[in-house]
Image (cartoon, grey):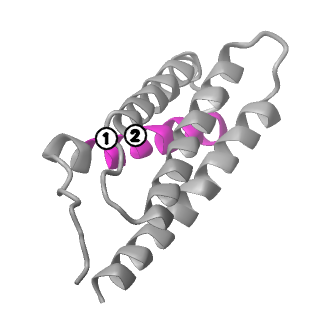
Amino acid sequence: MKNNNTAAPSAWVTAGAPAALLIILLATLVPFFMMHTAWAQAAYPYVYSAGALMLLLIRLFTPYRGSDMRLKRLHRIENWSAIFFCVAAVFLFFPGAQLRDWLAFTLAGAAIQIFTSIAIPAREAKIKA
């Protein structure tokens, strides 16, 4: 008999994490597609930082409470994606930093996010089976 004592995440977590990731995505696209728009160039570092901070708070304050260690590790790895996004946000305000510095951390966070978005549901399905 399996012990699955995980609770469903609350509504603000279910809607908040995808919203934060969408904010990060939209702010990431600004330097590439709106490069000649002054207000967008001035605002995107703040929008990106707000999305990264929102994601970090959601990830840190909604820990995995189940008993499966592999799933717990996957959720911990998922927290690192939010940390990478926050480091990227710091590079947006760091004088002398270039676009590639910020973009490298954004891509690293996205790669981790993609991996965990596939691995966590696969592990949960395997546990239920």
Neighbour tally class for label 2: few under 14, some 14-19, many 20 plus, Cα within 10 Å:
many
Q: Is residue 36 visible?
A: no
Question: Which residue is located at x 38 percent, y 84 percent?
Answer: 126
Q: Report the residue at 48% width, 41% height from top.
A: 26
Q: Are marks 1 and 2 in contact (CB under 8 Å)?
A: yes
Q: Which percent across, then down, holds residue 90?
A: 65, 20
Q: Amino acid at mark 1?
A: Thr
The quadrant in which the N terminus is found is bottom left
Q: Position of residue 15 (x, y in %)?
A: 23, 47
Most frequent secondary structure within the magenta stretch: helix
Label 2 amino acid?
A: Arg
Q: Residues within 10 Å of mark 1 (few under 14, many from 20)?
A: few
Query: Compared with residue 11, is residue 66 higher up or lower down, i.e. above or below?
Result: below
> In this picture, is 68 found above or below 1?
above
29 and 90: which is toward the camera: 90
In the picture as drawn, the residue positioned furthest to the top comes out as 95
Q: Which region of the structure is painted magenta? A: 16-33
Quarter-of-image position of residue 60: top left
Q: Secondary structure at mark 2?
A: helix
| Residue 127 part of the magenta-drawn span | no
In the image, taking residue 3 as reference, residue 82 lies left or right, namely right
Q: Which residue is mark 2?
A: 59
What percent of the width, then of the height, locates residue 101? 79, 32
Identify the image quadrant of residue 83: top right
Badge number at residue 62: 1
Q: Is residue 42 above or below residue 27?
A: above
Q: Residue furthest left?
A: 11
Residue 18: percent from left, percent from top: 34, 49
